[in-house]
Amino acid sequence: MIGRLINFFFWILLGALAGVALPAGGQSLQNSLIGMLLAVSGLHICNVWQGSRMLKWLRQTELNSNTHFSGVWGDTGDRIMRLIKLKDNQRQISEESLRQFLAAIQASPHGVVILDKDSRIQWSNQTAFRHLGLDPQIDVQQLIGNMLRSPAFSQYVHSKSFDQEVIIEGRLHRIDRPHKLGIQLFPYGDGRMLLLSRDVTLIEQAETMRRDFVANVSHEIRTPLTVLSGFIETLQTLALNEEEREKYLLLMEHQSNRMKSLVDDLLTLSRLEGSPFPGQRDWIAVKELFKACEEEARGLSERLHPAAKKAQVLTFDLPMVFEDDEIAGSRSELTSAFSNLISNAIRYTPAGGQITVKWNRTSEAVVFSVEDTGPGIAIEHFPRLSERFYRIDRSRSRDTGGTGLGLAIVKHVIQRHGGTLNIESKLNHGSKFSLQFPALRCRSPEIESSDQTEVI
Ligand code: ADP
């Protein structure tokens, strides 16, 4: 400030001195005043010129930092430049934060849509496009009600109660491939709303499965229970002779066995779901498994066809070369899977039919198979056979003591042992169910000796 005053007075003084120095014959005071006036005017014109330069400079869209101003205008220009740079930096930081924030919302597994107070779309992310088909560019300013034409959503919007989400069908929904979304609105600010969508297809499927499962179990248990209570009432109210009593008690035993089998299978399934996968440490002799299965199978076949003239032909084919094979896994699970397949073959194959149980091994896999000459299965049932309680012939399944859970157990067991369940069947031409295990799950002296030969 003092510098600028000194500068100002320096120019005035210079003007006055220049006036005095002029050869004006005794009018030095007047000349010095004229000199001072000229100096002030010069300074003023200089200021006006600098000011108009600065205005012109400021009117540019991009300020050129190479433009220089002198005196107080120079300081003002520098200060303006500094302020602009500061604001520029702040804007860049805010833009970067906004970009990061939007990128985070883009990465969200939830669809996000920002609605203005008229429920028009202001912004939406990519997930909202996948879920609802909203294009982040084209659909801006569209009314959300026009874009989501679901009656459930319209009802939800009109209810104005947004505490919970509403379930609607997603844009990829098809009868054979459901796509369900949970949509929830969150009001904020002055009437604006945030819409969140999440994919609930799997949750809904699990919920439907749970409901069906509970309904199926209740139904399966209620039927024998109703029959049992009917028999109990009969025994209590009617005077029966010994033979009749015996007959009723046998029927009651049959029903209670049915309930027991169902509960046993349910427990097996829940154990399979809740326990860790069987490791490769426990080795079970295949011969033992075959022996146990054969004893059980012959008993079941005789029980189911006691009066048959021509009994079922059961063949257990464990080739000599594989007799010492051992399989790694859980003994109880493998026994359960093998005997479920054998018992199905016995239960569904009529008397006189043939059932062949086989063990085979190649360098890639080990295969346990059960082949029968029973009624066979139409191909359209294949995908659903291992679903819980899925039966083709309900009455045959129940009459022979089936629970509808056998193949579900088999599928679980084989998956837990790293293998696959394969079904080959033709209606009226019998069926073949095979369990294919990875070769690593099998060991035998023969494999070990060939390994040794290779090592040597
Ligand atoms: P279930 O206790 O009813 O036998 P499963 O889960 O073991 O239940 O089998 C499901 C359905 O698959 C059976 O109800 C039956 O219709 C069919 N099935 C299974 N094994 C055979 C087979 N060997 N021959 C014909 N149908 C079979």
Image (spheres, helix red, strand yellow):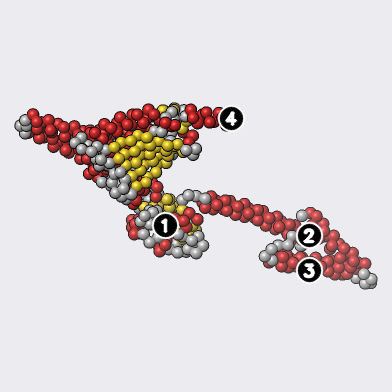
Tell which of 75 and 109 is nearer to you. Answer: 109
Residue under pointer 3: 45
Residue 159 placed where, x, y %?
A: 33, 56
Q: Are marks 3 and 4 in contact (CB under 8 Å)?
A: no
Q: Give the CA distance from mark 1 to mark 4.
A: 56 Å
Answer with left or right where residue 240 lies relative to residue 124: left
Q: Quadrant of residue 171?
A: bottom left
Tell me which numbered mark, 1 or 3, is placed earlier along the sequence. Answer: 3
Q: Residue at x 48, y 61 (%)?
A: 135
Residue under pointer 4: 455
Q: Are marks 2 and 3 in contact (CB under 8 Å)?
A: no
Residue under pointer 1: 172
Badge 4 density bin: few <14, some 14–19, many ≥20, Cα 10 Å: few
Amino acid tagged 1: Leu
Secondary element under disc 3, as helix, strand or loop, is helix
Residue 411 placed where, x, y %?
A: 38, 40
Q: Residue at x 24, y 45 (%)?
A: 394
Amino acid tagged 3: Ile
Answer with left or right where residue 418 lies relative to residue 2: left
Tell me which numbered mark, 1 or 4, is placed earlier along the sequence. Answer: 1
Q: Residue at x 50, y 60 (%)?
A: 136
Q: Residue at x 37, y 46 (%)?
A: 424
Residue 185 placed where, x, y %?
A: 41, 53
Residue 72, visible in the rendered structure: no
Answer with left or right where residue 243 lies relative to residue 349: left
Tell me which numbered mark, 2 or 3, is placed earlier along the sequence. Answer: 3
Q: Give the CA distance from mark 2 to mark 4.
A: 94 Å
Q: Give the CA distance from mark 1 to mark 3.
A: 75 Å
Q: Quadrant of residue 72?
A: bottom right
Q: In the orientation shown, which residue stands out farthest toward the left?
A: 239
Badge 2 density bin: few <14, some 14–19, many ≥20, Cα 10 Å: few
